Every structure is written in C-alpha cells, then in structure tokens.
Image (tube, rainbow, N blue to C red):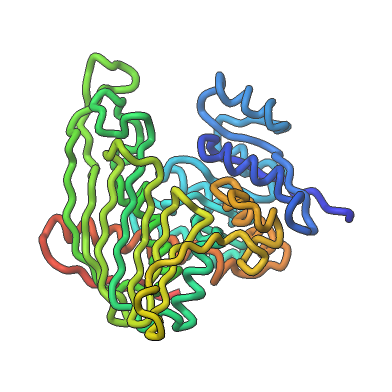
Amino acid sequence: MTRKEIGIGLLGYVIGKVHTHAWLNLTQFYPTTYSPRLAAVCGRNEKTLKPFAEHYGSEKTYSDWKDLIKDPQVEILDNCAPPDLHLEPCILAAESGKSVICEKPLARTASEAYEMYRQTEKTGQVHMTGFNKRFLPSTMYARELVRSGRLGKITHVVATFYNIETGEGYSNPNIPLTWSFRSEIGGHGAINELGSHVIDLLRFIIGEISSVCGATQTFVKERPLPENNSSKGTVDVEDLVVGCFRFADGAIGNLSVSWLPVATRDYLVLEVYGTKGSLRFNFERPAELEVYIHDDRDFAMNGYKTILCTSKAHPLMQRFWPDQGTSYGFEQSFISELAHFLNSVEKSESVEPLGASFYDGYITALINDELIASARDGNWHEVTPKGK
C-alpha cells in the first residue's frame, strides 16, 4: 500500500512522547492513506529537546511555537504543551490551514475553550481534543450497553479519579511549584488535569450533565520554587474536588478527583447503575469491564461478571491482538485515538461522535468551571453551553 507522508508538528514532548510513539506506530495497525512522520518538535529546553528529536527522527526543532506553525512541512499541529499554550497556537495553526489535535484540558477556562472551538471551526480544519480514554474497547462497550438500554434507565453514577504523578503523589510538599499548581498556566488544578477525563467519559457513556455542585480543598498550600528551592510560592489551585451532578435525563451522580492519594496509580473508576443492570470500570485494568444484567430466573447466581474486552467482538480489537488478555491498554488507546483523528483528516470530516471535538473540550471545561464556581459560593450551578 502506497501512503502519502504527512508532517506532524509536535508542541511539547512530555505526554508528547506518548503521542509520538502512537504516530510512528499507527500504520502498523490501521490502513491509512497517510503515513505520519515527525516533521518538527518545539520545546523550551534545548538540552532535552535535541535528544528527543534525534531519538524519534524529527528533522527540525524549534524554540518558538510560531516558527513551528510557519513550517510548511508541518501539516498537523499536535499540541501537547501546558494549557496556557493551547489557545493561540491552535487557532493560528487552523488559520494556517493545518488540522489540530490538542491535549486535554482543552484550555484553562471555558471561555478560552469556546474561543478555540469557534475560531478553529470557522477555518473548516479538523480539530480534536485528546481524550484518549474514549478509545478503549471497555469504555466503548460501556457506552454501547448504556445507550442501547441494556442497563435500563440510568439512575446513579459514581465517578472517581485518584492519580499520582510521582511515587508519593502530590501530597509530598517538597514537589516543586510546577505549572500544574499555578492557575495562570493550568487554569484549575486536579479537576482540569484529571477530572477532565472523568467528565468527558461521563458525557461519552451516559449523556449530558445539566447541573453541578462542588467543594474543593488545597492541602499543600506552598511549594518550593523550581528555580530556587530555598524559596516557596503559593499553590492557587485545588488538590481535591468532590461534587454532585444531575444528568439531563434525570440520573444523578457523585464525583471525587484528587492527585494526592499515595495508594493509587491511575484509579479512574466509573460505576453506572440502571434499573436493569450495572457496570463498573477501572482504568488500572483498562481491558476489563464488570457488567451485571439482572436475571430473575436464578437470583442466587446474580452478580457482576468480568468481561475481558479483547475479543474481536469488541470495538477496535480487530486491529490489534484479539483474545490476548493484556493486549490493549494505555499506549493502544493513543494509537486508536490518533488513527481516528487521521481518518477524519483524510475525509475532511468531524471527529464526532466517537472522538472529542473542540466543542466537547469546551463542554468539559464549562463543567469544570461550574464545579469550581459552585465550590466558592456553595450553590448548585446550571451547565448552560453556548451553541455550536
């Protein structure tokens, strides 16, 4: 099969390392018209930027994102930078005729996210928010079970995401005041960095969220400055968010998100309860889904059954290694995500509904904003998105 090369411009290379792996391995699993190549990488630290580019075969490096976007060989912008560098680069790239994929959270605030959507949509370029957890056979099957009515009417949802970024989690007060703890760069804290995934999965699997209330707490209020660890700076984002939400169809739910717990690694857990059945998902076991469908014929045998979502009967698995128990996980989700994006670029069509567009990224940002606003005033907040 003859493929046309398409140049990827990578902005940021922390989660960008995972993206790069996916781009370079994508054609092994998906038949595409395009063959992605890493045309250029942009970053601020030359000591780490150059080795990264050499290792992954990038032809060029840039320290200014505007130069990356001006490069005619960059046909897709893959924005993996912190949130304060999402708005301007993504809009400029789209206005320059390039398709854009941007890591979550789409922006620091809902107003920024909506501006990204509005300006990018006007150009006609394909855009996608990087919610890779949509691209798991287990979460896709969960969506199918809920949307098909197999679980009956959904009444209650429990959502949790406890994640540590280092061995002790962010509970260690000696972890420096990096961008994650600064609202001017990241917007919010745990709800943006972790909760964005949860909120998007709730919308993807269950449906729209109509109102929220929340409470937050910052436990580590000061951290050493990265440039001078003998001095400390103020943490002005939340470490923990708990909340309640109402779905448009009447279901209710509760949420808990934090980057402090030291006993977990990637504990993103969803519990969905319906009138005919229930399901449970844990991202620490990404290929599994626990499912219960009520059966009056033998109540003594009722209970959750663990489904190993790796057979060809499950979405995406025909592309990988079906029936191998650990054959799909974190890295494969990015491969499938970027393959979906590239397919949409080839066809010049929206990534929705399977993928998350910039509009989806905006809705998530709006829900996050309302949770934080509710925590400040103690009231329920309606979620009222602007139109497409």
Q: Residue furthest left?
A: 378
Quadrant of residue 7 within the rendered picture: top right
Q: Nearer the viewer, residue 284 or 133?
A: 284
Q: Is residue 92 visible?
A: yes
Q: Residue furthest right?
A: 2
Q: Could you tell me residue 108's position as x and y percent? A: 36, 50
**In the image: residue 123, left or right of residue 71:** left
Q: Could you tell me residue 283's position as x and y percent? A: 44, 52
**In the image: residue 364, left or right of residue 210:** right
Looking at the rendering, in which quadrant would you find the N terminus? bottom right
Q: Tell me if residue 339 comes above or below residue 64 in the rendering.
A: below
The residue located at (44%, 48%) in the rendering is 284
The residue located at (25%, 68%) in the rendering is 245
Q: Could you tell me residue 121's position as x and y percent? A: 54, 66
The residue located at (89%, 54%) in the rendering is 2
Q: Is residue 97 visible?
A: no
Quadrant of residue 171 within the rendered picture: top left
Q: Tell me if residue 345 comes above or below residue 3 in the rendering.
A: below
**In the image: residue 162, left or right of residue 139:** left
Q: Could you tell me residue 122's position as x and y percent? A: 55, 67
Q: Nearer the viewer, residue 28 or 348?
A: 28
The residue located at (32%, 60%) in the rendering is 159
Quadrant of residue 372 within the rendered picture: bottom left
Q: Residue furthest top?
A: 230
Q: Nearer the viewer, residue 132 or 359?
A: 132
Looking at the rendering, in which quadrant would you find the C terminus? bottom left
Q: Tell me if residue 90 comes above or below residue 250 in the rendering.
A: above
How many labels were placed on the picture?
Answer: 0
Q: Tell me if residue 53 comes above or below residue 323 in the rendering.
A: above
